[in-house]
Image (cartoon, rainbow, N blue to C red):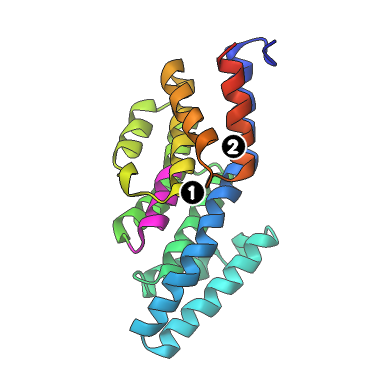
Amino acid sequence: MNRYETDEEQLTALKNWWDKYGTALLSAVLVVVLAWAGWSYYQKSQFAKASNASTTFEVLQSKVEQNAFGDVAREGLKLMEDQPKSPYATATALMEAQFELEKGHTDKAIENLQWVINQNIDASLVLVAKLRMTGIYIDQKQYDKATAVLKSVDAAKLAAGEKANFDFTSGFLALQQNQLDVARQFLQQVVDNTAAAANLQNVARLQLGDLTQ
């Protein structure tokens, strides 16, 4: 038996899951990317400049964990202005976007995400920005814009774990548009992807089960 009485309940349940875990899944990408991109930045930049960027980012990250990012949001914007080509500035822009989104300032959130895309420091960070932007457009029911963002991603070049996040977001968008066959395809790809996060696979499997009944 389907666990949800209506399609609307089904979509709401999936959206709630994404709101709860989606940001964490995408943020996990930052840990891996920054470990490499940050080191590369050290090699190519003056030590003091790179060190200051790293230190500032650590403070910003700490404030995020304390739910107090607003205390240092200006410092984040300054880092973005002073060192726009730093991977730390790019990650900071993602945090700024989340901060603005939580305040209900979707336009500013999108502006920060677009900044990440325009800087194009690292493909994985750009993907995070595009998936988050897609989520905002889905929430706003601007499905054409959400589709356009996803179409700008070259899925063939994604790593397996990134492809899982992309497929899940694509499936979520398809569900919102009642494109059930398309949604099934993307969700099945998540289930079959051995590099997908366990939580992502589980919710995709549950959702796929509901759609096939």
Q: Which mark is residue 201?
A: 2
Q: Is residue 205 above or below residue 132?
A: above
3 horizontally vs 69: left or right = right
Mark 1 Cα-neighbour bin, 10 Å: few <14, some 14–19, many ≥20: some
- Res. 131 image quadrant: top left
Left or right, 127 with reference to 175? left
Give x and y (percent) for residue 33.
Answer: 46, 64
Amino acid carrying label 2: it is Gln
Of 92 and 30, nearer the camera is 30
Where residue 203 sits: x, y (%)? Answer: 62, 32
Write down the residue under mark 1: 161
Residue 106 seen from this side:
no
Q: Earlier in the sequence, mark 1 or mark 2?
A: 1
- Identify the residue shown where x is 43% and y is 17%: 181
Query: In the image, which disc is placed on residue 127?
Result: none
Q: In which quadrant of the rendered view does residue 18 lie?
A: top right
Amino acid bearing label 1? Gly
Main SS of residues in magenta: helix
Label 2 neighbourhood size at 10 Å, few (<14), some (14-19), many (20+)? many
Which region of the structure is painted magenta?
A: 121-131
Residue at 34 percent across and 70 percent down: it is 85
Q: Position of residue 2 (x, y in %)?
A: 67, 12
